[in-house]
């Protein structure tokens, strides 16, 4: 196990048509450590301490697969997804660092 894992992908912030932001690969980066998950894209920066993560789960839309992060950080958008071409590797690394990842698709 490594102390830090980083993956490049895309991001979706927000669910609405007019109040959402979406960026494709390679503009977003997800970094995982045993203490936190950090998601970044351009000026968007979201750090989730382990105890602020309520649920990590697979999220699918058409042919896209991502990691949905449900959290308790009040100043961050409720809906956040990290899009990835390598979901299995991401899930494996998260589990190796002690994070629970739900297998059901949301």
Image (cartoon, rainbow, N blue to C red):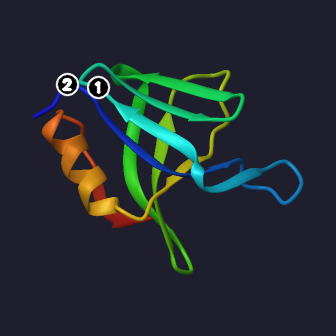
Q: Which residue is at a point 24% across and 37% down the rendered structure image? A: 99
Sort mark 1 into few (<14), some (14-19) or many (20+) by Cα contacts within 10 Å.
Answer: some
Nearer to us in this view, 66 or 106 = 66
Which sits in the foreground, 85 or 21?
Answer: 85
12 sits left or right of 93 in the view: right
**Whole-percent x, y for residue 90 in the image:** 30, 51
Q: Which residue is drawn at 26% across and 62% down?
A: 88
| Number of numbered discs | 2
Sequence-wise, the earlier of marks 2 and 1 is 2
Q: Is residue 63 left or right of residue 1?
A: right
Residue 84: image location, x then y, percent:
45, 59
Q: Identify the residue position indicated by label 1 in the image.
A: 33
Task: For the residues labelled 2 and 1, say whether their Cβ atoms are less than 8 Å apart.
Answer: yes
Q: Nearer the viewer, residue 8 or 37?
A: 8
Q: Residue 2 placed where, x, y %?
A: 15, 31
Q: Name the residue under label 2.
A: 3
* Identity of the residue furthest to the left in this view: 1
């Amino acid at each position: 196990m490594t102390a830090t894992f980083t993956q490049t992908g895309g991001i979706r912030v927000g669910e609405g048509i007019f109040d959402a932001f979406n960026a494709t690969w390679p503009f977003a980066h997800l970094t995982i450590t045993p203490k936190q998950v950090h998601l970044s894209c351009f000026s968007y920066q979201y750090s989730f301490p382990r105890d602020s993560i309520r649920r990590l789960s697979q999220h699918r839309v058409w042919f896209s697969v991502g990691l949905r992060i449900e959290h308790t950080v009040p100043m961050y958008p409720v809906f956040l997804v990290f899009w990835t071409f390598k979901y299995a590797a991401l899930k494996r690394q998260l589990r190796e660092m002690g994070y629970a990842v739900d297998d059901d698709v949301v």
